[in-house]
Every structure is written in C-alpha cells, then in structure tokens.
Image (cartoon, grey):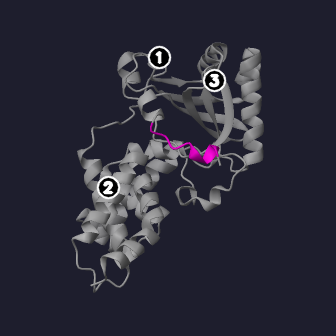
C-alpha cells in the first residue's frame, strides 16, 4: 500500500479534476470542496494497492459522494411560470442561482481547471432541475467522458439504464439551456451596450440588447423580496433601469467563462455578481447572485492577481 505521503501527493495531482466534477454535479463551490474532502477521507480508509487507475477510482468516489448529497439536498427546482406569475411570492422564493466561478476578464480561463470546457450558469440552472441520477449520468458521460459501464454501478442501474438517464438529461438540457455566443469580444460589446443604456436610463436601447424572451433570475437568499424571476425584455429592462439608480460600480469579469459583472456599493462592499448568456448578439439570460451570505463565501482572489 502506498505510504500516506505518497497517497497525499497522488491525491493532490487529481484534486482540481475532482473539484471540477463535484462543482458540475452540485453547482456549489463550498459543497464541491466538502465532496472532495470526503473523497480524501475515504481514500485514507481504503487499501488502493490494487487500483490501477487512481484518477478513475477517485472520480467514482467523488461522484458517489455528490449523488448522496444531491439526494439529501432540499429541492431547489425552478418551476415554470405563467407570464403573469413572475412577481408572485411563491415563485420568487424558490429562485436559486448556482455559485459563480469568477476570474479576471483579461486572464487565461483555460488554465483554470474549473473553467475547462466551461459550464455556464444557465446550464447549471438547468442541471438543478434534473433528478440526481440523471444529473450524474449526464455530467460524467457528456462532460467527463466516462462510459456507461463505469457509470452504471454508481447509480445502481444497468449500463442501458444509465444511458437512458443521460439521454433524458440531454434532452432537458437541449430544450432548456439556451445556446450561447462564445466570442468574448462580442459578449463584452453587448454587455457594455447594456451597461451604457442602463446608466443613461435609455429604456428603448436597453430593450434593444435584450432577447424578447429573456429570463432574469435574482437570488437574494433570505432577504425578503430580493429573489425574483422576471421574463420578457420590457420587464427585465425595467428592473435594470431601477438598479442603475442606486449608485453601483461594475467591474467586467469572467463568470463561468463568460463575460459578467461584479457590482459593488459606493462603499466598496460586494452587492451582486451577474452572469449573462448571450445568443445572436442579444442577452437571453441574466443570473444574479445577491445573497449576502453566499457572496461573502465567494473566492474573488483571481481579481487581485
């Protein structure tokens, strides 16, 4: 059996990969860290002398941990709303925006394991609506290339059943996750046009950069009235115009590999993080994390480097 020192060295070689798997499974940076830590504990309790591929073994372990966490997690599904329901208390209470991964807009996201084959916030929101086994099968197969023979024992299904889980999840993703423009320069142009129109209070210009069917999610956590789900360009433009009047400063960053914003109050305190999904030169989704408790846990160290 490897020495504890050698085992720790090997684990560290795979830590970034395991955290990437866990983050995509859970949509939470803190829960991903917990899952990785639990996989380290289980490694320490197991004789892996006969394990030929430690990376695959660890991936399976962290996947099992994540599956257990998903199954015990309080449901945070976003239910579809009628066009007149976006401001109802019941609908807004359940809005949840996954933890964003924030890096400098001028940095090199390809060097960050969390952003390799980057998963945007819009996709993570869709993944939140899947059954735990569906999410696991989709993430492990479609994102990380594991075979259904490898996935099957994790979800206690046959390989054929595991394939069906992934297929169902894929259909949901294709139906609900909007396609996005990947050119960061073009994304930035759209966001800067959005910011300028909001700053100038130009409602028509605001509407012009928004897709007619845009969806805005704002997750304010426990703050009464801070969470909301808004649909349609006119309604979203009204929200943007309102926030433009409270004196926030905005820093352009990368949020999960796409152009986004970090907003701060006049005294410098973090107010929100905005992730954008842009398709065809229009903003089709805006995901806002404004929960003070979760904002306080975000890793913003990349912005200081």
Q: Quadrant of residue 102?
A: top right
Let me know if residue 302 is in the magenta part: yes
* Quarter placement of the N terminus: bottom left
Please identify, in this view, whether the residue under mark 1 or under mark 2 is nearer the observer.
Answer: 2
Q: CA distance from mark 2 to mark 3?
A: 37 Å
Residue 140: % across, % down: 41, 63
Of callouts 2 and 3, the N-terminal one: 2
Question: Dot 2 surroundings within 10 Å: few (below 14), some, or many (20 or more)?
Answer: many
Secondary structure of the residue carrying tag 3 is helix
Q: What segment is highlighted magenta in the picture?
A: 297-304
State whether residue 57 appears in this view.
Answer: yes
Residue 95: % across, % down: 42, 29
Residue 256: % across, % down: 57, 47
Q: Quadrant of residue 232?
A: top right
Q: CA distance from mark 3 to mark 1?
A: 14 Å
State whether residue 160 appears in this view.
Answer: no
Question: Dot 1 surroundings within 10 Å: few (below 14), some, or many (20 or more)?
Answer: few
State the residue at coordinates (47%, 63%).
16
- Name the side, left or right, on which 248 lies relative to 197: left
Q: Which mark is residue 233?
A: 3
Circles 1 and 2 in contact, beta carbons < 8 Å:
no
Q: Quadrant of residue 164?
A: bottom left
The residue to which callout 1 is attached is 84
Let me know if residue 269 is in the magenta part: no
Secondary structure of the residue carrying tag 1 is loop
Of 180 and 34, which appears nearest the observer?
34
Secondary structure of the residue carrying tag 2 is helix
The residue to which callout 2 is attached is 66
């Amino acid at each position: 059996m490897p020495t504890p020192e050698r085992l720790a060295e090997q684990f560290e070689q795979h830590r970034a990969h395991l955290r990437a798997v866990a983050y995509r499974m859970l949509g939470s940076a803190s829960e991903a860290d917990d899952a990785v830590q639990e996989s380290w504990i289980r490694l320490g309790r197991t004789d892996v002398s006969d394990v030929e591929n430690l990376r695959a073994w660890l991936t399976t372990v962290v996947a099992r941990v994540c599956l257990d966490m998903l199954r015990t997690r309080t449901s945070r599904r976003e239910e579809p709303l009628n066009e007149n329901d976006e401001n109802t208390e019941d609908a807004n209470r359940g809005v949840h925006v996954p933890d964003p991964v924030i890096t400098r807009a001028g940095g090199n996201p390809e060097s960050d394991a969390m952003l390799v084959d980057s998963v945007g916030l819009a996709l993570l929101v869709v993944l939140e609506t899947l059954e735990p086994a569906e999410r696991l099968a989709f993430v492990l197969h479609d994102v990380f290339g594991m075979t259904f023979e490898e996935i099957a024992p994790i979800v206690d299904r046959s390989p054929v059943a595991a394939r069906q889980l992934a297929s169902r999840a894929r259909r949901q993703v294709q139906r609900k996750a909007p396609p996005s423009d990947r050119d960061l320069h073009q994304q930035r142009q759209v966001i800067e046009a959005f910011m300028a129109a909001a700053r100038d209070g130009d409602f028509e210009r605001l509407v012009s950069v928004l897709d007619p069917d845009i969806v805005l999610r704002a997750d304010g956590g426990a703050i009464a009235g801070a969470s909301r789900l808004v649909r349609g360009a006119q309604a979203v433009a009204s929200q943007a115009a309102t926030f433009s009047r409270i004196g926030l400063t905005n820093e352009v960053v990368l949020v999960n590999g796409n152009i986004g914003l970090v907003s701060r109050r006049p005294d410098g305190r973090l107010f929100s993080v905005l992730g954008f999904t842009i398709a065809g030169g229009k903003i089709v989704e805006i995901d806002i994390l404004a929960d003070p408790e979760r904002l306080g846990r975000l890793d913003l160290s990349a912005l200081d480097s």
